Image (cartoon, grey):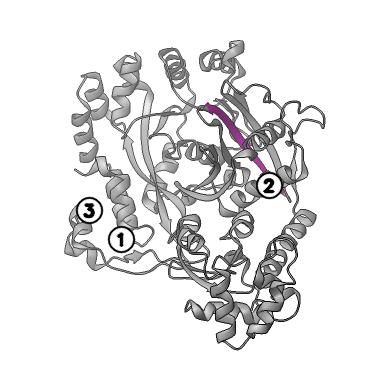
Amino acid sequence: MYNADEKYLSELLIESNLLTDIQVEEAKGQRKGTESLVETLIRTGQAKESDVSSCFAASQAREHYELTNITPDKEIVDMVSLENARRYGMVPLGFSEGRIQVAIGDPFDINTIDSLNHVLGYDVDVVISPFEHINDAIGRWYDEAIGGLEADNELQVLSENAPGEAGGDAGANDAPVIKLVGQILKEAFNAGASDIHIEPLENSVRVRYRIDGVLHEVANHPRNLLSAIIARIKIMSGAMSIAEKRLPQDARIQLRLGDKDLDLRVSTVPTNHGESVVMRVLDKSALSLGLPQLGFLSDDQATFEQLITLPDGILLVTGPTGSGKTTTLYACLNYINKPDRKIITVEDPVEYQMSGINQVMVKEDVGMTFAAALRSILRQAPNIIMIGEIRDLETASIAINASLTGHLVFSTLHTNDAPSAVARMADIGVKRFLIASAVRAILAQRLVRKLCDECKTPGELSERQIKALGLDASQLADSTIMSPGGCVKCRGTGHKGRAGIFEIFQIDDEVRHMVNENLSTPQLRRQAREIGMRTMREDGIRKVLNGMTSANEVINVTMSDAS
């Protein structure tokens, strides 16, 4: 119960006049089983737990709280998972200026106190409460809340195998495992995670959420639960083999949380400690994103709206993996999706199902490649085509032919900036005169974390930041510089949500001539700048100056764009 020497504890109680020497000796003879002396004293009524807890808290110079009449906001409770609350015997009480206050039962448990900063990811202020109060609070704040959630907002698995089809791992269909996996998913959805990582370590199973592009460790489970957790996830997919643990597997899980439909894209990979699982959260509400929600400022939005309503040509969206290219394409399709237009997409895989749009999924194992799908859909007489990614010459050639025959084509490439897309297309094997003829514009993008609207505060840029961003006094004079704070809404990070920073490279007659002349990427970039292209760093600077994001975010994300 208390991680300290029994003799020391009894002496503290005696010195505080809570007990006498005689009562302590009597309690030693009244023990049951492995019961500690303090537990015996409390059970027999010779000491009240609240008095004992207060005495021990005072001995360690810690504040003592009675939790019977305290119920913190749900946002604060959500900052500590039920798993961690039970594992460490703690409950959260408040959050302020990047520090979380938690109550634990044992002021002598130095190991737990020292590890809380790492476990929770925040600076921790510890107060002491009676064990019975903490257990009661966990029941009231978590268990009852979960019960209510399951009644009104139950997590339904739409893709799950029927009972009895699991085979393999024992425990996969046990209620505790089902509840544990369900809780991991619910907490991820509530936190706004884009990915859920379940990773086997040597002695534990680590759970991490990617929130706004940053990984946060949220829980560690016993190593012996790995097999059951993985098996449960495979059962939920309805398509993965539980028996197969030596090869990677991919599938989808369809869920309904209350009235909200969610998809998870699941990937398992065998590692030296067991199977690792990553689940990409596909929230269908993201389909309602408009161009302003992507992060476009008004002038860039007006330019981009003109480009995506052109009658023909190719519009490329470029950037590394995880830069939001697919989200941008879906927002474009959402903007131009009208009853008088036929839109067909070819994707690998189809991430979101969009109403009024024909979506084709690539299945290379049966011969349905990007190129094969494109050849077929051209016979469907579409007005607009979206290709998930241009990967090879055959796909690129069909896309270009489609654009030159009166179709508007959207697609993505993996390049670091917009002008580099020309060289990338040429590397694939596309002739430069075709690139010049077909491509209308190239949008390059990155994602930066937005400052939390609830806690951001007026701030100033450091000399280092001003120098890194190349700012002058006139730019700073009319700016609204904001600094990250830290609150419950943003989980103490100072950031909530992400927005894009963009560069829009429009292909005019001079650029077409330069492409045909096989001029280098730096030369194309200089020309793009001359005709008005803002770099991603320059767009990021504008968003720093209007208080949307922080200087460090833009500096870190656009490190390669410093010139």
The amino acid at mark 1 is Leu
Rendered image quadrant of residue 353: top right
Tell me which secondary structure the magenta stretch mostly adopts: strand
Q: In which quarter of the image is the C terminus?
A: top left
Horizontal arrangement in the rendering, residue 266 relative to residue 202 (left or right): right
The amino acid at mark 2 is Leu
| Residue in the picture at 76% in, 28% down | 166
Query: In the rendered image of this protein, does residue 157 appear above or below residue 480?
Result: above
Rendered image quadrant of residue 131: bottom right
Please give the range of residues in magenta.
Answer: 260-270
**CB of mark 1 within 8 Å of CB of mark 2?**
no
- Is 80 contained in the magenta span? no
Whether residue 114 is visible to the viewer of this picture, yes or no, is yes
Q: Mark 2 points at which residue?
A: 180
Between 535 and 508, the one lying in front of the other is 535
Q: Is mark 2 on a helix, strand or loop?
A: helix
Q: Mark 1 points at which residue?
A: 545
Q: Nearer the viewer, mark 2 or mark 3?
A: 2
**CB of mark 1 within 8 Å of CB of mark 3?**
no
Whole-angstrom CA distance, mark 2 to mark 3, is 46 Å
Horizontal arrangement in the rendering, residue 468 relative to residue 424 (left or right): left
Between 161 and 381, the one lying in front of the other is 161
Image spot of residue 277 (x, y percent): 57, 34
Q: Which of marks 1 and 2 is in front?
A: 2
Q: Which of marks 1 and 2 is nearer the N terminus?
A: 2
Q: In which quarter of the image is the N terminus?
A: bottom right
Q: Mark 3 points at which residue?
A: 469
The amino acid at mark 3 is Leu
**CB of mark 2 within 8 Å of CB of mark 3?**
no
Between 280 and 435, the one lying in front of the other is 280
